[in-house]
Image: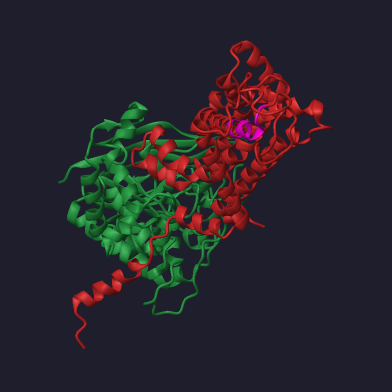
Chain colours: A green, B red
Amino acid sequence: MSERILEVRDLHTQFFTDDGVVQAVNGVSFDLEAGESLGIVGESGCGKSMTALSIMGLVPEPGRVTSGEIRFRGHDLLRMRAEDVRDLRGRDMAMIFQDPLSSLNPVLKNGFQIEEAMLAHKELPRRQAWERAIALLRKVRVPAAEQRARDYPFQLSGGMRQRTMIAMGLANDPAMLIADEPTTALDVTAQAQILELLRDLNRELNTAIIMITHNLGVVAGLCSRVIVMYAGQIVEEGPVEQIFERPQHPYTWALLRSVPRIDAIRHDRLRSIEGLPPDLISPPNGCRFHPRCPFRVDRCFREEPPLEQMGEGRRAACWVTMERAYAEMGAADLADVRPGAGSGVHAIQEVDLPPQNPQQTWGGTEERVG
Amino acid sequence: MATSATTVDQLIAAPVARAQIGLWQDAWRRLRRNRLALVSAAYLIGLVVVALVGIVYTPYPYAHEGVGLPYMGPGAGHLLGTDQAGRDIFSRIMIGAQVSLIVGLATQAVVLAVGVPLGLMAGYFRGWIDTALSFVISVFYGIPDILVAMILIVLIGKPGLGTIIIAIAATRWMDMARLTRGQTLSLREREFVEASRSSGGRPAKILFGHVLPNALGPIIVQATLGIPAAILFEAFLSFLGLGVPSPTPSWGSMAADGIHAIRIAPHIVLAPAIGLSITLMAFNFLGDGLRDALDPRQRR
């Protein structure tokens, strides 16, 4: 068993806006092991980026981490002095961003920007730093690295820019690299190349990668474990193959169903998830997904499901779970479930709920409490 | 078909062979196409040469009275004639050019040294620094420039170039601080600043390494356009008798000297006035040219 480098416990990050407190991250807990590649997926605004920025200590105004614990290689990041966290940033943990053009300073040469990440952390002769910058560009497979280092960002293609960003992130051999939607701004070919590069770097350098994306294909190609977030919370977690094969949370199931598959036998319609992610100033009571969930039961309106262990290395937060939906509906019926709130509920309602809920009422959706 | 590895490498390296075009080269290319800015730059270079020559050589000693008859018109002996005390106007124009250039450039140096760091800090850290700076700027804007300058000149009490430079800079630093603050406010939100922070960059490094280089264009333009304003203000102060003390000539004090005799010897006023006008125009044209060159998007 390898070393655990990151432990996040009950993380809460909130934004104090004029309209109210936005609960961007709400009680997120997870671990990351050395050399692991973890995917965090979810729709826009589900808190994945904010989780990453909380770890990096870069939550923008007016947001702030309000409670919880983040331990990175024995450091308690939330209780460290800001300068000490800054020393870790870029050295032991690095982050790459979505848009590589705007993340590179337009008036500085590429090599200089890679160099800077090194020089911020150690005394190094400029010459040596420059040479390492070129070596890093080679490592991320930038052709003609020496010339590229002397170019400005606008002279590179999108893929080359993202490689430059990755080189910046790798400048000090970090133990953990957080990639926030690194391929979203790229065309498909460049996407595939960047993913392959990240996969190789993950293997070669044993750098742990947290891949934040809304693209399930990216997760499938790169990650061994995946966390699904919804409305600031983790709703499901587990090994990638298992999650893809048999999701437990209806949100994960719906998310997977909304991905076009080239190998689909049946020519199903793409099923989008109806509705919008909830308002995080006043999130819905009970399960936060219930307003959009096809399989909701009464309990979902009232009680928040805990993130429970469901077999080896798997967790899910759902009162119903897809396991029951499979068991009770069968694959064919399930495929016909329309997206939208409560549409699959008739099949579930027929059976008793697990015993941990003694006073289950069967009143239907009108009982929703405000 | 022998597509060797070298060929592929050559193909990959091929686009690199094009000329390295940085942002400054690009700006220079655009500036070169602007005739008016180029002529202005040439004139200003000429003015600098004249001022420099004035250090070691003037046709006549500039402070000597009676090197010619009073009120002589322009002619062969005295290129621009003489003033009411029989001093050679051309020699005095040369020294006046020194004064104008020193005041213009030094004032902007002070303005940059004060305004840019203040603006960077206020824009980046915001909070109380920003509040305090904005308050002080508002106070300075509330007092007329001439009053600020006069109070400072009286307070410092030592007439001379240094006093004038400080007095003028005190009326002009706010624009620079405001401009830099505004630029910083927008630049601090850019992703490359966040990227630098995520790689452990310190605030000083971020401000001077990332924010300032991106704000440099507007700052240069503002500084260039501030030079003629400072020169004009110095001439104005000297005209009022608050400028550089006699016998050092300034274009402003020369005009003041000649104003009494404007009917009989207009050249005494005209020579410094025309010199001043052309110089101001040249700086303004150059500043406009720089703005167009450094920020082509702003062009209509």
Q: Evaluate whether residue A246 shows in this view.
A: no
Q: Identify the residue shown where x is 72% and y is 25%.
A: B239
The residue sitting at the bottom extreme is B1
Q: Does residue A14 appear left or right of residue A104 in this picture? A: right
Q: Quadrant of residue B64?
A: top right
Q: Does residue B211 appear left or right of residue B88 in this picture? A: left
Q: Evaluate whether residue A144 shows in this view.
A: yes
Q: Position of residue B212 (x, y in %)?
A: 47, 40
The residue sitting at the left extreme is A1
Q: Per the image, is B89 magenta? A: yes
Of residues A31 and A245, the one nearer the viewer is A31
Q: Per the image, is A51 magenta? A: no
Q: Position of residue B126 (x, y in %)?
A: 53, 30
Examine the rendered structure and indicate whether residue B254 appears above or below residue B220. Answer: above
Q: Quadrant of the N terminus of chain B?
A: bottom left
Of residues B296 and B103, the one nearer the viewer is B103
Characterize the magenta stretch by its predominant secondary structure: helix
Q: Position of residue A110 (x, y in %)?
A: 35, 53
Q: Quadrant of the C terminus of chain B?
A: bottom right
Q: Identify the residue shown where x is 61% and y is 11%.
A: B157
Q: Does residue B176 appear left or right of residue A192 in this picture? A: right
The residue sitting at the right extreme is B263
Q: Position of residue A107 (x, y in %)?
A: 43, 50
Of residues A369 and A172, the one nearer the viewer is A172
Q: Which residues are magenta?
A: B87-95
Examine the rendered structure and indicate whether residue B79 appears above or below residue A249. Answer: above
Examine the rendered structure and indicate whether residue B34 appears above or below residue A177. Answer: below
Total label count? 0
Examine the rendered structure and indicate whether residue A231 appears above or below residue B273. Answer: below
